[in-house]
Image (tube, helix red, strand yellow):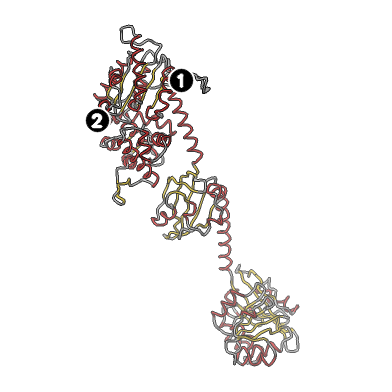
Amino acid sequence: MQNVLIVGAGSRGTLLLNLLLDSNFMNVCAVVDIDMKASGITLAKKLGISYGTHWKPFLTDEIDIVFDVTGEKVVFDELMKNIHMHAQVIPSSVVDLLVGLFNGKIQTEMDRQRLIFNSIDEGMIGINQKGIIDFINESACTMLEVSDFDAIGKSIYNIIPDSKLVRVLKSGRPELNEELTLPNGRKIVSSRYPLISASGTVFGAFAVFKDVSEVVKLAEEITDLQSVKTMLEAIIHSSDDAISVVDEKGNGILVNPAYTRITGLSEDEVIGKPASVDINEGESIHMKVLMTKKPIRGVNMRIGEDNRDVIVNVAPIIVDQQVKGSIGVIHDITEMRSLMKELDLARQTIRKLESTFTFDDIHGSSQEIGLAIDQAKIASKSNIPVMLRGEAGSGKELFANAIHSGSNRKSHKFIRLNCGAIDPSVMEKELFGEASDEDSGTSSRFGLLEEARNGTLFLDEVTHLPLSVQSRLLDYLRFSSSQSDGKNELQTATARIIVATSKNLEKAIHEGTFHMDLYYALNRLSIQIPPLRTRTIDIPEVAHHLLKKLNEEFGMNAERVSDEAIAKLQTYEWPGNVRELENVLSRAMIFMKHGSTVIEEEDIRRSLFTNEVKVDGDVLPEKSTLASVMDDYERTILEKALAEHDGNKSLTANRLGISLRSLYYKLEKYKLI
């Protein structure tokens, strides 16, 4: 017994209800119509059949067949969306056929075909008790690619070899929504019903079927897309680089396990959330790509709970010239940077332990640098103190190394002491050491002058020496001079002293912060290191040398600097001198296009930060990040504070409200000492 729901209780619905009430294989469970005065509703009330104004409450899993008698496409489509898998919706056109067949209003086969069969899109075909086709509509003929003349009177197996209508004829039970492939390859979904007389005798069977070839093709395409999607997801999930995908609104739709590992964020914390959810510093590159519709590559960022350093590449996803989202690949460089820092530290340590610089490492052919080199070579043949004067970054330490390497002391230690980086209270102990003290339990230790015996002690920024230490250093120099043999050469039992300063020593003497006698003792041989801006002719040679050095340090292969880039470098003032030139070139190497071996003018322009914008009246670099702006501002404050107090570290620390240790740390960070 099939459970039936009738939707539409007008005149046709009432005829169908009466028809089904006479059958012994269908049970009418409910009748529905928006008009509660409809004749079918009235009849249902009398018979005790459930009724209502909407079909949804009655569309349960127990319903096998729904007859749509409304004739409205919207109602039929809604029924198709909500019906369960094993049930069947019979459209109003088929209902008209059934009512006509069983009501006897249409008498001849020709009339039935002409008036009803041919008016519906579904294919219909019927057989008698012997399995002979006795009716077929035009839609069925079209699907089967036969004429009604060729079909009627033939066995169903001649037209559809795999037909199951004879089985329904024998069983007397309907079969719903079964797939079948016709001889021409067309795929259909068919529902088959027995024709049962009022006396309960099965006198035939008919099938209603619909062409689903296009639907099957679409389903196969969807299946192929699902396979491609599964493969792509497998590729994405196997990547060691973090991958994130967002939609056109910037909300996350896909991340891989590597993304979770790097950011510490799970899928639930990212999917459906804004693209900025994982960013600790900087702007969302996903959002920028969605706005510009252009890829952005090589962006340094910090993401995740651990503030990990990453490089981000993001590209838009464009379909039919419309941006549908963006995909980002995140490469974790935290460990790489850590290793690079360790490598840099190791190299710095090696450079401190070994004096590897010679006069060959001083590059330039200008008259100014040539004079300084000639003076330094003369100094290397003597043991008298040398004073190197020049701006910060001009190469004073390089000259000190070269003088030591060219002297007869080169096989002994070269020790550098940055006087501005040492706490004045311990400066004396650093230079002269300290004797053991039984009361305090302090053991004796040698000072740097003793460690540099027979070698060279380089005192950088000598103006930072406290007056008390200056006096002892003067005594040391006088003692060494008294041991000379009259040829201005010191005995090898003492250290050779080379000092350097970027300050105005004469002003310091006038202000009483530098000992005049020490000045004269150190100034016996003074060498002025020219600033880079006065010898721009040397920039090509210096840049070429620095490029080789940076290639070794970064593991890169920048072969040269273009002529246009050199011209750009030569127009700059270089307040930081050679040290700043090295910094600019290192940044330019990062800005180089992928695969390029030449530093171009654009790379230099971006590295110099010469394009400026104003924010609230302050001039800021156009390419700067918040961190770099803060660093630049902090450096400026430190420089001004130091200038106000003539380089006095204690007064500067008190003025800024920080500890002396913090001040020294910051000065070292910004290379101000």
Which residue type does callout 2 highlight?
Answer: Thr
Regarding residue 457, the answer to whether it shows in the image is: yes
x 53%, y 47%: residue:
262
Location of residue 393 (image quadrant)? top left
Q: Is residue 545 left or right of residue 300?
A: left
| Pointer 1 local density, CA inside 10 Å: few below 14, some 14–19, many at least 20 | some
Coordinates of residue 151 in the picture (x, y in percent): 63, 78
Identity of the residue furthest to the front in this view: 439
- Which dot marks residue 434? 1
Q: At which x and y percent is residue 49? A: 68, 87
Residue drawn at the location 37% of the way across and 27% of the way down? 419
Which disc is residue 91 wearing? none
Q: Is residue 387 above or below residue 210?
A: above
Characterize the local packing of mark 2: few (<14), some (14-19) or many (20 or more) Cα atoms within 10 angstroms: few
Badge 1 marks a residue whose secondary structure is: loop
Residue 571, compared with residue 74, is above or below; it is above
Residue 347 image position (x, y, % from top left): 45, 28
Q: Residue at x 33, y 6 (%)?
A: 485
Dot 1 amino acid type: Glu
Q: Is residue 564 above or below residue 427?
A: below
- From this viewpoint, is residue 149 visible? no
Residue 577 on image: x %, y %: 31, 32
The N terminus lies in quadrant: bottom right
Is residue 265 or residue 571 the one in the foreground?
265
Depth check, front residue: 423 or 150? 423
Which circle's residue, 1 or 2, is located before the other in the chain?
1
**Which residue carries the number 2 mark?**
534
Could you say which quadrant of the image residue 478 lies in? top left
Q: CA distance from mark 1 to mark 2?
A: 45 Å
Seen at 70% across and 74% down, the residue is 164
